Amino acid sequence: MLAKSNSASANVNKTSLDYMAEGYWQDFIAGRPVAGGIAYEVQLHQCQLDESLVSLQRVDTLISQIRRDIAKSKGSSGALDEITLLTDDSYRNLLLFLAFYTGRVLARQWQNIPHWYGQFELRKHYPELPVVADDFYQHMAVVYSDNSNDSADVFFALEPIGMRLFGHIDRQFQAVQGEKIASGLYQAVSTRLPKNNGIDESVAAEPNLEHHSESVGIRPILITDETFQNQRLPVQATEHREIPVTKLAVAQQAEPSIVNATASVKPKISETPINLSATTTQLQTVKHSKASVMPEIFTQLLIEVEEIEVPQDVGKDDYLQACKILDQFERHIARQNKPRDQMQFSELHQTSRQQALTLLQNASALGNTDAMLRLAMYELLGEGRITDIEASKVAGVDWVKQAANDKDVRAQRLLSKMYYQGVGVPQDINSGKYWLEEAAKNGHAEAAELVTQWQDAQALITTQKQEQHSIKRYQLLIGIVLVGAILLVVFV
């Protein structure tokens, strides 16, 4: 399998870490227990660790889940933090195993044998590397290419793992080699692939795919309009699941009127093209029809994600890369004049789409609300990464709520619509009103206008009631006077 098994790195005497790495892998494959155990071992097996580059995307998703689990544990008696995790044998073994596996994947791309160095060997062979003695993430590294004298061929696999678990928000990471630490294993390994092998053989790129100039680490398959048009024998897309029609149908309506025919609070949906400058492509907003390609609630969301800028401190590269792929899918779907669930795509296109969704999830897990909203949209449409319909819907709602709780005004506005219209959640006018007011309070112009209209309508109703009450009192008074006058005439 490794064509260069007689390479220089293969002839180097094995270190204790080499034996440890091989032992971890063999025990994992055979299902044998490791001393101290490995946390999330069942989930690791579910990641289908076949030593391919794309398998690192599945590992990144698992690490993101672990990060969320750690975040949820805070405040509880069993809280997990970085120090606790690194002193727990099962978690420490997990991080070491992930690093060893990443080294295997990277070396396989170079058709070489991974060779692991601890800090003693690193200082001996690469004295120029500023290794920090007490930094767990720098205490070992893998050499993966033939030129073992070049420190550029040394990879500190624990660094991107630590970054994904605790980086950005919790603390800053400083790379040994000075460059920015990638936000995931897939990205970190992708930047170190051989120049003549830009992507793993299991996800080989299609010829003449869209060219792009950015270099952000990950290299998902990029799809052009021509590849959509020229695809042969299309394969049915990954199971499309839709929110029940009764739920989506209400997306064509505005929030229920809080007052009857007194004031209209129907939002004005723009029908101009969606200009996504971040992706250099345009998505045409499609009017609703029998063959609608996108519910209005989500076309408006895509517009707002572009027009209402919310600063993002994390996950930008992953989000932009995902948009490059998904925007092309949306543009292609918009031209077909058929329901989304009838669209068909080739296996290559589906692979690309899944990579883009994984990038969205990665960015969402780091706290990027742009990614949360777009991922939520696909989950609510039943086109996300989760195959179970109900679980997909729940995940979509959770992402919107998380972004709304982070004071993203677009998410707050979207959540108000979802409650008003019963999309993904039970219809709840009070909750819809609450999130509409939150969006208005935090600066959402349309929400503020609707709240003002609602308040004006309420004031008008109150005035009308007061006037009607006054008229009734006036009429009663007149009636009493007339009766008195009549009695006076009768008796006098």
Image (cartoon, rainbow, N blue to C red):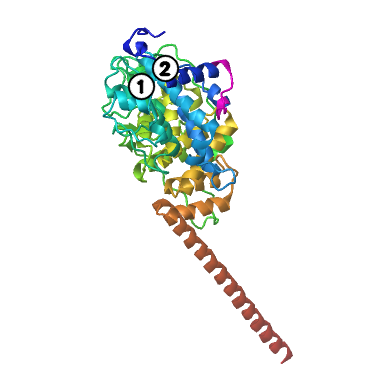
Q: Residue 223 shows which numbered tag? A: 1
Magenta residues?
A: 29-41
Mark 1–mark 2 distance (CA, rounded to whole Å): 9 Å
- The three-letter code of the residue at mark 2 reads Leu
Reading the image, the residue beneath label 2 is: 348
Split into 4 quadrants, where in the image is the C terminus?
bottom right
Looking at the picture, tell me which residue is in the foreground, 420 or 386. 386
Query: Is residue 290 something one can see in this rendering?
Result: no
Residue extending farthest to the bottom is: 492
Badge 1 local density, few (<14 within 10 Å), some, or many (20+)?
many
Split into 4 quadrants, where in the image is the N terminus?
top left
- The three-letter code of the residue at mark 1 reads Ile
Looking at the picture, tell me which residue is in the foreground, 388 or 234. 388
Residue 426 is one of the magenta-drawn residues: no
Looking at the picture, tell me which residue is in the foreground, 13 or 146. 13
Q: Residue 268 at x, y = what percent?
A: 41, 47
Q: Residue 105 at x, y = what percent?
A: 41, 18
Disc 2 on helix, strand or loop? helix
Q: Residue 431 at x, y = what percent?
A: 56, 51
Q: Earlier in the sequence, mark 1 or mark 2?
A: 1
Quadrant of the rendered image containing residue 321: top left
Quadrant of the rendered image containing residue 286: top left
Q: Main secondary structure of the magenta part?
A: loop
Contact, CB < 8 Å: mark 1 with mark 2?
Answer: yes
Badge 2 local density, few (<14 within 10 Å), some, or many (20+)?
some
Q: Residue 413 at x, y = what percent?
A: 46, 48
- Determine whether, in the image, residue 286 is placed left or right of residue 463: left
